[in-house]
Amino acid sequence: MALKINIGDYRHLLDAVLVELEKDRIVDRIWSGDYTVWGSEPAEISNRLGWLNSPQAMSGRIDGLRQLAFELREENYTHALLLGMGGSSLAPEVLRKTFGFSEGYLDLAVLDSTDPGALLYHADRLDPARTLFIVATKSGATTETISFLKYFYKWMSDKLAAEAVGDHFIAITDPGSPLAELADQYSFRASYLNDPDIGGRYSALSYFGLLPAVLMGVDAGSLLNHSFDMVESCRKTGLSVEDGNPGVILGAVMGMLAEADLDKLTIVTSPRIASFGNWVEQLVAESTGKNGKGILPVLEELPGAPSAYGDDRAFVYLKTKGDNAHDTAMEAIERAGHPVVKLYLDDLYDLGGQFFLWEMATAVACHLLKVNPFDQPDVESAKSLTRKTMVEYTEIGVLPHEVPALTSGETAVYGNVKADSPEETLAVFLSQARPGDYVAIQAYLQPTEETDRALSELRTKIRDRYGFATTAGYGPRYLHSTGQLHKGDTGRGLFIQLTADDARDALIPDEIGSGTSSVTFSVLKRAQAMGDRKALLDAGRRVIRFHLGAGAPKLPFQT
């Protein structure tokens, strides 16, 4: 991998930051586990540094994972569905979308949405006799993941002999977690207990990322070999831009530019590795977005003219060998004076090194921003409000009633904005924007290619008309990627929440194997949307919700 930096007038600031980091012995202190790099107390720091040694620790475990893959092939398994959220699911998704799966290995998909349509899509297509479920959660108690487990355990129990069901489930979790106990109680095929000193978003090069990789036929040994090279590069104590420590240099650029109000880190990738941006998003956003600070990753954005971007942008271009899809656009952005960092990947297995590079860079950026990269203090607010809503639902049988500010056809608008149509409402809402603001679209809709395109078009219209950065995420997936930043950053976000009626629904069993249910996935998803909207409002954020009614939701907004 090669790194090239063109940040114009900010170069002298970078040089000064690197001198200071070298003077402070930042590299030695990180590798020695010095918690004072990020805080005055060791809590949520000293027990979150296992990622530094995870590549080496995992190197001796790959053969065991290959044996599992061989056994599954011998038993005619063909598919796997990973049940997980955020750091437990995004690295496997990157590897599946980048490498695909090899003949004789498992065709793996990821379920990270409580949208019932997303869940039922997999239930409709999978052959229970040939499917393995990978239940992945560090805490072992993630609401979404355990709900998926309850559903699919019952689904399998209805189709297979009782003694065969457990063989179709494996767990990846921390030692002693509730999931580890469930895996033992229900005779899962296997449990893989991860190093508890690795946080979820830093877990790509642990069991969470590498076990699914092996089951798909990805060469996990090669991924680790590339990560070893990056680990050694990130041990360098010399910090010159030309041949220094790439993790520290990238982190210094990120942190220094964010402190200079260039906090919209726009990730541009070669098409083959486009999904890597989603992994970077959750790592950077959850780690940096707190205490009134934050770096907003902007990804999957259609290229625009340099004039379409505000002066709060910094760009990172990840380019694979032989690809030039975005070269022209990036050259124009560079000529216009926007800061650009280019990372050149020699082959796809360089992603093993990229995982570690970005972990180190994010940790360094957080040092400069004076925030702890390993905690998530604002995530609990939305979870708590969701739980409160769910308790109310189970007690009285209905969710809290909300009164729309406007109804037009099937669309209802909720928020403190007065207008005569949904289109005008959106325009009035966006008129609140100030320099440095961003728009975050939170889509509690079934993820489909059609909806992907509609969200992308809406983002492009907003960017080109108003000139500020936009992001889009499906709910509740984004809660595990950008939810912390939305409530913990500088407060510059304008949040557009999109909800709709679900065409189908699915019951969540009260317990694993139970035939009774008190709640459905549609209710859980709606409660999560309500909880996060209330948490955002409580944090002083600007929020509006458009409920799009029934059928295939349309986004009729003309910005």
Image: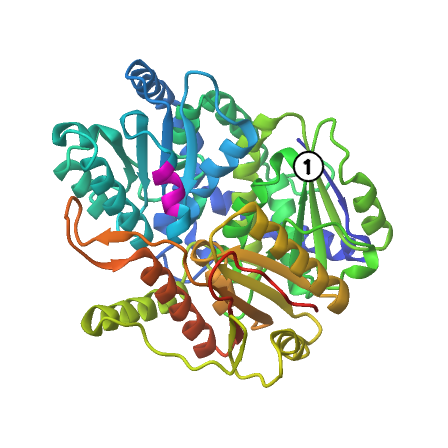
Residue 442 can be seen, yes or no: yes
Q: Which residue is mark 1?
A: 270
Disc 1 marks a residue whose amino acid type is Ser
Quarter of the image containing the C terminus? bottom right
108 relative to 462 in the view: left or right: left
For the residue pair 346 and 78, the one nearer the viewer reads as: 78
Residue 139 can be seen, yes or no: no
165 relative to 199 in the view: left or right: left
Quarter of the image containing the N terminus? top right
402 relative to 327 in the view: left or right: left
For the residue pair 426 and 231, the one nearer the viewer reads as: 426
For the residue pair 85 and 138, the one nearer the viewer reads as: 85
Display colour scheme: rainbow
- From what the image shows, is residue 239 above or below residue 430? above
Q: Could you say where residue 318 lies in the image, as x and y percent from the top left? A: 67, 39
Residue drawn at (64%, 61%) of the image: 470
- Rendering quarter of residue 242: top right
- Rendering quarter of residue 172: top left
- From what the image shows, is residue 538 above or below residue 307? below
Q: Main secondary structure of the magenta part?
A: helix
Residue drawn at (58%, 70%) of the image: 493
Residue range highlighted in magenta: 119-124
Most extreme residue toward the right, as rendered? 335
Element type at mark 1? loop
Q: Could you say where residue 204 lies in the image, as x and y percent from the top left? A: 45, 38
Residue 279 counted in the magenta span: no
Residue drawn at (64%, 51%) of the image: 252
